[in-house]
Image (spheres, coloured by chain):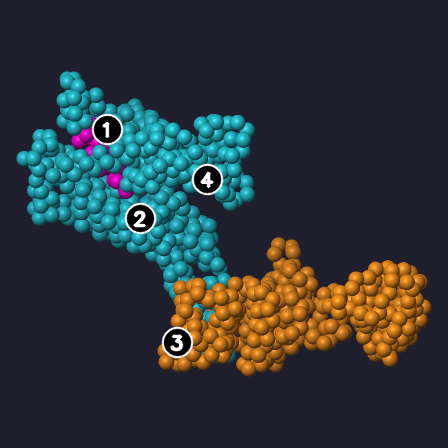
């Protein structure tokens, strides 16, 4: 049967043309896809769990757990991470909630500016922000400190970024966009009538905000807070840059220390288990919270939304928004640009300190930096391509129930969300770095790692898109003789172009920022900008580092700009 | 051999039978309508014929070959049928010409041949000038025609239509119904048409299958369905009617509450009691045409004047159910007035 063309088949009388189910190429395609998916997702995680329970020789043993969790230093690291998570969450809430309120519900001027500033904070990589703040608020040479010393004549400046709160501050600056997005999405659904009802009963503006509007979106805020907490405890880049000099031991820095000589993969795996379990539990809690959307609007639709007039408070809010923009984007970018144009950044701002030599060096002399930039763009682009391609296929297969056990397959596709990047990297290292795959140091391993980590984004976006399609459009293809693959390529994918472009850009941007997943897996040939940042920072080579950072930010901004042109202005800050 | 046959076709969701042992046969070139109220199972039956739903019981046979059964069903893409959906399902990312030519492209027809046949078909549905337009630029009626062209160009084994006219306004509906019938007469595809609108069904069908709660009540020509309904549901669903009980004595029927009996042409099987369906326009008050038989006295208990006729509600003097009578505008009776009621015996349908 497979050797006969479709046309000839359809021309036969019906009695002779009924092919066997296994002759359909679509079935094979989706079967292979699901197998690849399971391999991608299940392999590292299972390997991780397996390694935690075995010695390096392969014997069953709990000694890794004893060694990892038995020492008080290691337990202290876990505790420190939990404190850090709480601190970051508090700060991020402080940053994100007022801004979301201001943009979504009030008549504060400059709402477009605020929205753009949040987008910029999202695009800015965590580690670059950390570098910028080291340059700004380092205890001796930080420019803010030197400014205070000059202006006020004190002995030394008040800011020390190498501290617990300095660390929490920097992390919060670049994770708060998540709070903003979740809160704003929920607030956008609240009808103004609810606030009007409060006003009529005599509630003042502040009271209305506090007692009517905010409680309605509390589940979304708490849901976002949980995600921030999890991201903070799983972060490596900023802790590596700030916590290590500050001698604060965190879970992630502890894990990485297990990977230094001598290599103790099993101990790292065992140490990761509590974090993994905590992540899973908190995510389940978060899902249950957000499932109860009945809080937001009874009728389902948002209803009329008018900006709420807050009188003179709007200037205060605008000032706050400008302050946040200064702290997250304006000051850091300014200092990075200045440092990148300096011969020696410590010498301060003066005309004889300006030079373009750093940029010249990274493009034409320091081949490691140029290679890192190229690698970052290449790997991010490749990952985004694979994620989008696989994402639409998996989404289509599970939404239309083409494969058996569609719910399980969808769960597998979204499972990596529950695994912190660093821990996933351990699993990937255990699974692929050594024999039989021996992929350590190769670019392919990075792409595999990133794909595993970020496929859920693409699957979620594509699933939402497929769900919104009228099924009759697909049925019309099938009744005219087109198989499932024809439906996917000729109708579903073209109709979801915007969604797919948006997903591509989103995954691309996130990949450029990613450090935790790449840190164990890059070798000399496959270095990326994020990991190189750590090396350059250790060397104290801030000028080159700043130049590299500026180039990366420019590239990503261009890509995001193209994305906004192609997929609509809002695609990055939409909750999927 | 029939073209399409449904043998005891059933579909259950849980314990609820949505389609219940439906059996019917379509001859080649016939246009049969599945007619019934919402929830009667007509769309489910159509989708089982198309292959989107698998039957719980029974089989579907096309040209003698079984294509649907609980054990195995041929997938929709291999049935060689085509379908017009309620939402038209015209692909917005393709032009009119690309939409219409899609089925031919799947069948790997040569490009020149596709272009020729698409142009031909677009002329048939009178859309020749709009070949390069996109669906967003078309009106509802035009999209409907694109759907028709797309479905017919592949010369399907069976053409399926799922309430294609329900999204159109009344004037357009009539025009498109005529169009569909015209195209059927031109191409003679075996067609299954689903609708809840009985006027539409009567206008275009060769035969109509009336479905009620998943069961096939009656399948017959429009004339027989209207004048010889075989179940109370069919009698009440197609047009308005009076359902009256009566005593059968040999071949004479005497209705409850009315003194006189009359000879029932064609006789009736069964016992002494009978349920009869009599259309309001086959009953007469005061004056009656030749051939009508007087039944007895009635009193007028209600009346509405509708311009073209009076709608009277009368109660027989001997008790029994009230009867609806459509009388000519000149027949004016007051409420409470007594009158004689006549019936046209040939228009009385006996229902089991």
Q: Nearer the viewer, residue A156 or A196?
A: A196
Q: Residue at x 42, y 47 (%)?
A: A411
Q: On the rendered image, what quadrant is the N terminus of chain B found in?
A: bottom right
Q: Which numbered mark, 3 or 4, is in the foreground of this view?
A: 4
Q: Position of residue A526 (x, y in %)?
A: 19, 47
Return the residue at label 1.
Answer: A243
Q: Residues within 10 Å of mark 4 (few under 14, many from 20)?
A: some
What distance separates the C-alpha of mark 3 from that of mark 4?
56 Å
Q: Which numbered mark, 1 or 4, is in the foreground of this view?
A: 4
Q: Position of residue B121 (x, y in %)?
A: 47, 78
Label pair 2/3, CB-CB below 8 angstroms: no
Return the residue at label 4.
Answer: A306
What chain does mark 4 sit on?
Answer: A
Left/right of residue B322 with respect to residue A534 in the rendered view: right
**Which one of the lettered chains is coloured cyan?**
A
Left/right of residue B138 with respect to residue B17 in the rendered view: left
Q: Position of residue B97 (x, y in %)?
A: 41, 73
Could you say which disc has been placed on residue A507 in the image? 2
What distance separates the C-alpha of mark 3 from that of mark 1?
65 Å
Whether residue A340 appears in this view of the structure is yes
Whether residue B19 appears in this view of the structure is no
Q: Main secondary structure of the magenta part?
A: helix
Chain B visual colour: orange
In terms of secondary structure, where does tag 1 sit? helix
Q: Which numbered mark, 1 or 2, is in the foreground of this view?
A: 2
Q: Nearer the viewer, residue A204 or B100?
A: A204
Magenta run includes residue B17: no
Q: Position of residue A183 (x, y in %)?
A: 41, 37
Range drawn in magenta: A123-138
What chain does mark 2 sit on?
Answer: A
Could you say which disc has been placed on residue B108 in the image? 3
């Amino acid at each position: 049967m497979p050797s006969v063309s479709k046309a000839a088949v359809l021309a036969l009388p019906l009695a002779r043309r009924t092919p066997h189910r296994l002759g359909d190429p679509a079935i094979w395609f989706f079967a292979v896809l699901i197998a690849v998916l399971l391999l991608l997702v299940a392999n590292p995680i299972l390997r991780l769990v397996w390694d935690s329970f075995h010695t390096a020789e392969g014997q069953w043993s709990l000694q890794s757990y004893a060694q990892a969790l038995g020492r008080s230093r290691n337990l202290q690291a876990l505790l420190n991470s939990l404190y850090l998570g709480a601190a970051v969450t508090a700060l991020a809430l402080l940053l994100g909630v007022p801004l979301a309120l201001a943009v979504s519900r009030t008549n504060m001027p400059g709402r477009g500016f605020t929205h753009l500033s949040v987008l910029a904070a999202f695009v800015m990589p965590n580690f670059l922000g950390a570098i910028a703040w080291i340059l700004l608020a380092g205890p001796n040479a930080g420019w803010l400190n030197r400014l205070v010393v000059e202006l006020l004549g004190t002995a030394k400046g008040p800011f020390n970024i190498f501290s617990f709160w300095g660390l929490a501050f920097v992390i919060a600056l670049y994770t708060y966009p998540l709070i903003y997005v979740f809160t704003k999405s929920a607030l956008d659904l609240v009808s103004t009538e609810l606030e009007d009802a409060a006003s009529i009963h005599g509630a003042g503006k502040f009271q209305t905000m506090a007692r009517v509007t905010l409680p309605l979106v509390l589940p979304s805020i708490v849901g976002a807070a949980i995600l921030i907490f999890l991201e903070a405890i799983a972060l490596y880049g900023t802790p590596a840059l700030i916590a290590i000099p500050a001698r604060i031991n965190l879970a992630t820095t502890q894990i990485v220390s297990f990977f230094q000589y001598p290599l103790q993969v099993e101990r790292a795996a065992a140490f990761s288990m509590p974090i993994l379990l905590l992540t899973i539990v908190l995510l389940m809690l978060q899902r249950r919270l957000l499932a109860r959307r009945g809080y937001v609007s009874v009728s389902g639709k948002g209803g009329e939304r008018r900006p709420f007039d807050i009188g003179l408070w709007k200037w205060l809010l605008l000032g706050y928004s400008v302050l946040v923009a200064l702290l997250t984007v304006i000051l850091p970018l300014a200092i990075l640009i200045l440092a990148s144009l300096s011969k020696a950044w410590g010498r301060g701002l003066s005309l004889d300190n300006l030079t373009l030599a750093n940029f010249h060096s990274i493009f034409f002399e320091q081949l490691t930096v140029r290679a890192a930039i190229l690698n970052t763009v290449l790997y991010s682009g490749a990952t985004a391509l694979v994620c989008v391609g696989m994402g639409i296929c998996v989404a289509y297969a599970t939404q239309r129930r083409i494969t058996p056990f569609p719910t399980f397959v969808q769960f597998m596709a979204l499972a990596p969300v529950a695994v912190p990047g660093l821990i996933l990297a351990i699993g990937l290292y255990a699974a692929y770095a050594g024999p039989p795959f021996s992929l350590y140091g190769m670019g392919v391993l990075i792409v595999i790692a990133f794909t595993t980590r970020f496929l859920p984004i693409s699957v979620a976006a594509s699933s939402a898109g497929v769900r919104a399609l009228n099924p009759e459009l697909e049925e019309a293809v099938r009744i005219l003789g087109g198989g499932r693959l024809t439906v996917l390529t000729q109708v579903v994918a073209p109709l979801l172009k915007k969604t797919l472009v948006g997903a591509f850009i989103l995954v691309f941007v996130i990949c450029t920022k990613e450090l935790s997943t790449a840190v164990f897996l890059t070798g000399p040939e496959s270095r990326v900008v994020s990991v190189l940042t750590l090396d350059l920072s250790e060397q104290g080579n801030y000028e080159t580092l700043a130049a590299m950072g500026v180039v990366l930010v420019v590239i990503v901004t261009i890509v995001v700009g193209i994305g906004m042109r192609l997929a609509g202005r809002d695609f990055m800050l939409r909750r999927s | 051999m029939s073209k399409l046959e449904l043998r005891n076709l059933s579909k259950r969701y849980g314990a609820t039978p949505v389609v219940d042992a439906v059996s019917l046969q379509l001859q080649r070139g016939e246009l049969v309508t599945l007619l019934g109220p919402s929830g009667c199972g007509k769309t489910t039956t159509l989708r089982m014929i198309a292959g989107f739903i698998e039957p719980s019981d029974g089989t579907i046979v096309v040209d003698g070959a079984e294509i649907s059964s609980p054990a195995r069903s041929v997938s929709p893409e291999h049935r060689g049928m085509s379908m017009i959906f309620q939402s038209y399902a015209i692909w917005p990312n393709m032009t009119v010409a690309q939409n219409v030519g899609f089925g031919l492209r799947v069948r790997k027809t040569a490009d020149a041949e596709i272009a020729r046949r698409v142009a031909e078909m677009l002329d048939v549905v009178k859309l020749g000038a709009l070949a390069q337009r996109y669906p967003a630029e078309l009106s509802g009626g035009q999209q409907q025609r694109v759907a028709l062209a797309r479905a017919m160009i592949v010369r399907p084994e069976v053409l399926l239509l799922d309430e294609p006219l329900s999204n159109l306004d009344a004037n357009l509906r009539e025009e498109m119904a005529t169009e569909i019938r015209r195209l059927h007469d031109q191409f003679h595809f075996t067609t299954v048409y689903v609708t809840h609108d009985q006027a539409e069904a009567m206008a275009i069908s060769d035969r109509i299958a009336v479905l009620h709660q998943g069961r096939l009540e009656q399948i017959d020509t429009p004339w027989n369905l209207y004048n010889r309904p075989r179940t109370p549901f069919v009698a009440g669903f197609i047009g308005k009617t009076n359902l009256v009980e009566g005593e059968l004595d040999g071949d004479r029927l005497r209705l409850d509450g009315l003194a006189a009996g009359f000879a029932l042409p064609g006789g009736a099987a069964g016992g002494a009691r009978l349920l009869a369906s009599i259309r309001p326009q086959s009953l007469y008050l005061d004056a009656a045409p030749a051939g009508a038989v007087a039944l007895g006295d009635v009193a007028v208990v209600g009346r509405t004047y509708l311009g073209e006729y009076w709608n009277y509600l009368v109660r027989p003097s001997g008790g029994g159910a009230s009867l609806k009578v459509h009388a000519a505008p000149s027949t004016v009776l007051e409420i409470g007035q007594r009158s004689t009621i006549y019936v046209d015996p040939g228009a009385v349908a006996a229902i089991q």
